[in-house]
Amino acid sequence: MKAGKIVLFILAGFSLIFSFLFLLGSGGQTGGVNYIWTALILAAVGFILIFSATRIGAPSKNEPNITVNIDLPGDVGMDTIKCRSCGAALSPKDVKLVAGAPVVTCPYCGTTYQLSEEPKW
């Protein structure tokens, strides 16, 4: 499908270039209304090709969602985690995996910090 996109974009480019050339040629001695109509039709074809190329391979609504489960290290009681900044209670949905590390974002004050494990000893 990637090759089809490239071909459509190249054809659209040629169509838009020739459209511009016909528009420029319509002002000359041999040009006229027919050149303007040709330029408009080529421009329309070019934009339709661009629209078609952007729709090829677009993600469909039926693709499965990928869920990442975070296995927190050590004994972490999710019901006891509080925001370091404002003290609000945080829920498990506030923990996300960013660059391989669990990161907590407070929904109340917007503070973001990395969740760290306390030593077990």
Image: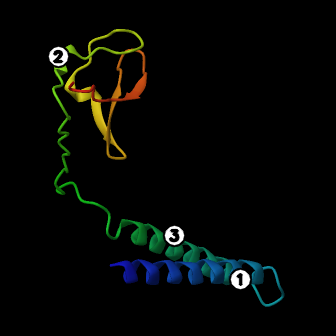
* Direction bottom: furthest residue: 30
In the rendered view, does 100 fall on the left or right side of 110? left
The answer to whether residue 88 is above or below residue 45 is above
Determine which residue is flagged by label 1: 21
| Residues at discs 1 and 2 in contact (Cβ within 8 Å) | no
Q: How far across and down, in percent of the image, does residue 46 sit? A: 53, 75
**Quarter of the figure with the N terminus:** bottom left
Q: Which mark is residue 13?
A: none
- Amino acid type at circle 3 is Phe
As measured in the structure, the alpha-carbon distance from the residue carrying label 2 to the one carrying label 3 is 55 Å
Determine which residue is flagged by label 3: 47
Q: Nearer the viewer, residue 38 or 115?
A: 115
Determine which residue is flagged by label 2: 79
**Quarter of the figure with the C terminus:** top left
Q: Nearer the viewer, residue 95 or 121?
A: 121
User: Which secondary structure lies at badge 3?
Assistant: helix
As measured in the structure, the alpha-carbon distance from the residue carrying label 1 to the one carrying label 3 is 16 Å
Q: Earlier in the sequence, mark 1 or mark 2?
A: 1
- Amino acid type at circle 2 is Asp
Q: Residues within 10 Å of mark 2 (few under 14, many from 20)?
A: few
Determine the image quadrant of residue 90.
top left
The residue drawn where x is 34% and y is 15% is 83
Q: How far across and down, in percent of the image, does residue 27 sit? A: 80, 79
The answer to whether residue 94 is above or below residue 17 is above
